[in-house]
Amino acid sequence: MVSISLCMIVRDEEEVLARCLDSIAPAVDEIVIVDTGSLDRTKEIAAGYTHKLYDFQWCDDFSAARNFAFSKGTMDYLMWMDADDVLPPASLQALLELKESLDPQVTVVLMPYNVAFDQGGRPSFSYERERLIKNGAGLCWRGAVHEAIAPRGKILRSDVVVEHRKTKPGDPDRNLRIYEKQLAEGRSLGPRERFYYARELFYHKCYGEAIEEFEKFLSMPDSWLENRLDAARMEAVCHDLLGKPGKAMEALMKSLAEDAPRAETCCDIGRHFMGRKNYRAAAFWYETAASREKTTRGGAFINQDCYDYIPYVQLSVCYYWLGEKALAKRYHGLARALKPDDLAVKYNEQIFSAMQ
């Protein structure tokens, strides 16, 4: 059986740290906590779980902090979690079983990461992350923000799910501040950093600048396909918000030119046509979205609702306006089966009930 070191970086996490550690402690053999400057009871709480508690001088570089934490792990595999992550009970049992069966030749174990949830508690946004890293394999974190380890060697995809259960907002300007500091210091941004820098500009409503950065990213030859697809979609949103729907559609076409369409892109195109009351075209794209395979494999950002619930709701509306009431009711029923308490479903229910 392999052993695991849980290696975490924390700062001012007194509200959630115990919740995280309680959820994972039975499955790990060592806990390493690296504090980057807490002013609350975080270190006191951490000391109740481990004696391997270290301080790290924060330097606006998440990779530096995570690599320091990993350097203190002594077990076969190094695992990371954020303080506001939890391991659900089913995943705890699955991780214990994985420890028993894991081939020691495996270098990286990828696990699904559920980071957002709908009103019913179901995952609505997920992606795959490198979660267990073989100690001594020479892999390290890279990137000052949105840091990651590029998997290589023998890779295993696991069904052990980690959930991100945030309880309070973070510093909304931190990531953009770090990127702008890097640029001010004359540092160049690689493809991944350029993509995330463009996203930060988007979140800060700097839509013109975000478009420029997304286009720079899309011109970089070594950029990752899934990031390219997301960049094209986000560029389209920027154009829409700037009142340029034609440019928005051009950006969405970039996504279609890259690979088979993802459901997220299909929903974006469907929304474009619905906004122009072209319900036949919109229905085509929403039907295409509903036909796409939903999976967290491959590392892509997955908006779960784009693969079923959103298309079903929108198709019920499209076919209602097209006068095809039987199809409209059918898709309403599919949406209702998924989320009976959603406001859109309840509103549509009143309309379809009146049609009896």
Image (cartoon, rainbow, N blue to C red):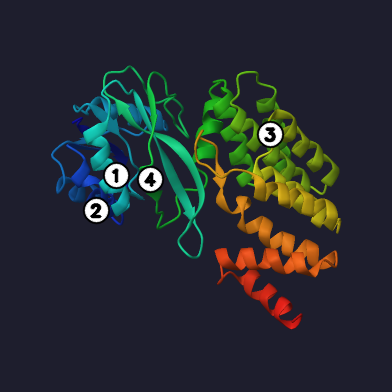
Residue 256 rendering spot, x and y as whole percentages: 73, 34
Q: CA distance from mark 3 to mark 2?
A: 43 Å
Residue 178 rendering spot, x and y as whole percentages: 50, 34
What numbered label is drawn on residue 18? 2
Instruction: Decide if residue 5 is in sight here.
Output: no
Foreground mark, 3 or 4?
3
Secondary structure type for disc 1 = helix
Q: CA distance from mark 4 to mark 2?
A: 19 Å
- Does label 1 or label 4 sit earlier along the sequence? 1
Q: CA distance from mark 3 to mark 4?
A: 27 Å
- Does label 4 or label 2 sit earlier along the sequence? 2
Q: Say which amino acid is labelled 4.
A: Val
Foreground mark, 3 or 2?
3
Q: CA distance from mark 1 to mark 4?
A: 9 Å
Q: Say which amino acid is labelled 1.
A: Ala
What numbered label is drawn on residue 260? 3
Tell whether label 2 touches label 3 (CB within 8 Å).
no
Q: Identify residue for label 1.
A: 94
The residue drawn where x is 32% and y is 52% is 88
Q: Which quarter of the figure is the N terminus placed in?
A: top left
Secondary structure type for disc 4 = loop
The residue drawn where x is 36% and y is 27% is 108
